[in-house]
Amino acid sequence: MDMKAGKHKVAIIGSGNIGTDLMIKVMRHGRNLEMGAMVGIDPASDGLARAARLGVPTTAGGIEGLLAMESFGDIRIAFDATSAGAHAHHNQLLQQHGVRVIDLTPAAIGPYVVPVVNLDQHLEASNLNMVTCGGQATIPMVAAVSRVAKVHYAEIVASISSKSAGPGTRANIDEFTETTSKAICSVGGAAHGKAIIVLNPAEPPLIMRDTVFTLSDLADEAAIEASIAEMAQAVQAYVPGYRLKQRVQFERIPASAPQNVPGIGLASGLKTTVFLEVEGAAHYLPAYAGNLDIMTSAALACAERLAETSLAAA
């Protein structure tokens, strides 16, 4: 088969930082994908200008502009990199035309997906939600502990450079915490979850850092550490800048001296602490913006898998 002829054409809705970085990733690294359209609402945006220079069809007419494009019928997958509020309208229209949707907003219309944890369970879904940047970074670690011991509570703190938080991120802060907390449970396997985001104004800008705390049943600490290392390596397959910042830390909390855990009350067990760093690939965004890079990388990994499955079945 001629792979170029068999590639899935994709559209990216949202010509901001995330959408532009994703476009460059598709063009540089797309194995089963090729750009079909870049969609924005600001005719003067750098993303639309860059797409036009690269020969990608563009429209500044938003979703309606995409639907009116002559080449729209060739689009198989659409990435939505706009906002949670706009996504519901976009998804409704795209579904009417049979276009698969990968949602990079916290709208959570489709199932939460973290590629290394549960993508294979949702290959037939018409809409896949990429949770949040903090979710993509930390949920694999919660899941790594969950496959060794029952996790009663998981808490994540995502610290990102203030410079890497654009208007879309800032508008979705509440959705970020709510969506990530839910996915910690439904994807990561924790009984209770909590998410915190910190916008760090430090100069020079700091690379994304994430801290993951879990409280689980007592278990073999070496087995948990090995599971975490294996999961980190799996994430590195599509996010090379993803790494453990230091060794995993453990603390055994005895039943005689329980700690007060949010949503649970007094509890005992094994506390596991994981420290992560996510450095971006610097395709379009600066290297410190690992929070944005992990979202575009996860979305690309999902789309590649969808296209690969579809092409194999054809």
Image (tube, grey):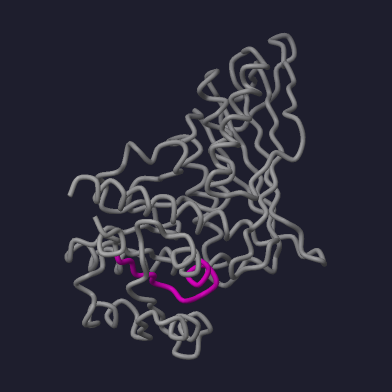
- Residue at 31 percent across and 41 percent down: it is 122
Figure disc tally = 0
Question: Considering only vertical position in the picture, is 193 above or below 36?
Answer: above
Work out whether residue 86 or residue 279 is closer to the camera in this orientation and state it: 279
Give residue 52's position: percent from left, percent from top: 43, 85
Give residue 206's position: percent from left, percent from top: 76, 59
Work out whether residue 285 or residue 83 is closer to the camera in this orientation and state it: 285
Which residues are drawn in magenta? 9-21
User: Is 110 situated left or right of 50 in this image?
Assistant: left
Work out whether residue 204 or residue 313 is closer to the camera in this orientation and state it: 313
Residue at the right extreme, as displayed: 203
Q: Quadrant of the N terminus?
A: bottom left
Q: Is residue 271 magenta?
A: no
- Residue at 72 percent across and 56 percent down: it is 207
Work out whether residue 13 or residue 158 is closer to the camera in this orientation and state it: 13
- Residue at 49 percent across and 90 percent down: it is 44
